[in-house]
Amino acid sequence: MSLPHALLTALVEHPCSGSELAERFDRSIGYFWHATHQQIYRELARLEEAGWIEALPAETGRGRKRQFRLLPAGRKELRRWIAQQDDPVPLRDALMVRLRAEAAIGPSGLEKEIARRMAMHEQKRALYQHIEQRDFAGRDLSREKRLQHLVLKAGILQEEMSLAISKEALQILREPSKKA
């Protein structure tokens, strides 16, 4: 995935200013594709230069923000990107390498780091579940909302998987080491 396409997706949903986009990004797509506000602003300039978005004239008055909207060329690019084939990205998780290193060299105090990560995964899962209850529970959902819900459910499942792996790792790490 690329940041430009994440931003085009956000803008196709709702035209907005750069700061509003950064805030929206932090509350939605940003859970699955992290970007700093600086990166977002730089990319908005590139998207405008490519003719995929345009900045509408700022409203008069002090502190008024430029609104960005998707142009037909941006919608065309987003459709092209959606249809392209990509291979799954290989897992790159330093914790998995640390577990392998622990297996090779013996106890190293990794339990504390895993416990810390578990707390982070529990917080994120709780946040996702809160969003799910707030935005999707007990509603007759449109196709668009069901797709958004599916993305959220993927996040919930990812956090649950991370918690299950961490829990099992802690159980194993707490066992006495037996060199074979």
Image (spheres, rainbow, N blue to C red):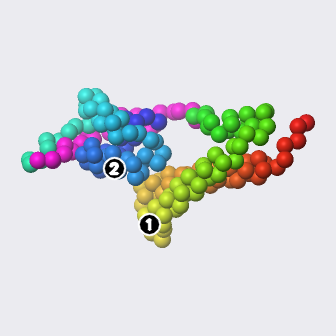
- From which residue to which does the magenta span run? 62-88
**Is residue 126 toward the left or the right of residue 162 in the image?**
left
> Disc 1 marks which residue?
134
**Is residue 59 toward the left or the right of residue 90 in the image?**
left
Q: How crowded is mark 2: few (under 14 residues within 10 Å), some or many (20 or more)?
A: few
Residue 99 marker: none
Residue 80 position, x and y percent, is: 40, 34
Residue kind at label 1, given as amino acid type: Arg
**Camera-side residue: 52 or 174?**
174
Whether the magenta-drawn stretch holds residue 82 is answered as yes
Q: Is residue 175 above or below residue 141?
A: above
> Disc 2 marks which residue?
23
Residue kind at label 2, given as amino acid type: Glu
Residue 23 position, x and y percent, is: 34, 49
Question: Under tag 1, what secondary structure?
Answer: helix
- Identify which residue is drawn at 30% across, 36% down: 41
**Camera-side residue: 160 or 148?**
160
- Identify which residue is drawn at 40% across, 52% down: 27
Residue 125 position, x and y percent, is: 55, 57
Question: Under tag 2, what secondary structure?
Answer: helix
